Image (tube, rainbow, N blue to C red):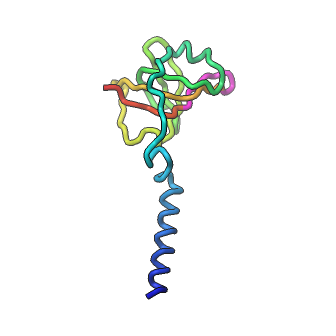
Amino acid sequence: MKKIFAATLCIMFICFNAYAKNGHCDSEHMGGGFLDTSMQPMSIAEVKKQPEDSYVALQGTITKKIGKDKYHFTDGEDNIVVEIEHKKWLGQIVSPKDKVMIYGEVEHEDGVCMVDVKSIQLMK
């Protein structure tokens, strides 16, 4: 009986470990963290002037997917590339008709400004 119990525990541990490693068990899915929603959205023109790693908020629409995790984003005046990892979507479905609020960090790669999205919220 002890061997069956030990074997069951081992199998459960292995399965949970595999589940967690596949991104199903990170802090964002297990209760989240602090998100400063009091930040006022910036225009894309303002964001492009920010230094690397600045935390910014943007409001607008995602117009199309251009790569694995990369999307074109517009505020109606300008465009910027945003990088949104799959787990950041949190199950939300967004179309080009939907307005979203994005919180993220500014990145400058090869002279191109992008935003690494930390959180995305569908506006109602």
Q: Which residue is located at x 56 percent, y 31 percent? A: 116
- Relative to residue 5, is residue 109 depicted above or below? above
Q: Is residue 91 left or right of residue 88?
A: left
Instruction: Report the magenta residues as a range.
Output: 109-116
Q: Is residue 110 magenta?
A: yes
Residue 50: image x %, image y %? 62, 18
**Pick the front one: 36 or 106:** 36
Q: Which residue is located at x 66 percent, y 27 percent? A: 109
| Res. 110 image quadrant | top right
Q: Main secondary structure of the magenta part?
A: strand
Residue 14: image x %, image y %? 51, 68
Q: Is residue 107 left or right of residue 73?
A: right
| Res. 120 image quadrant | top left
Q: Which residue is located at x 36 percent, y 38 percent? A: 92
Q: Which residue is located at x 51 percent, y 62 percent? A: 18
Residue 95: image x %, image y %? 36, 30
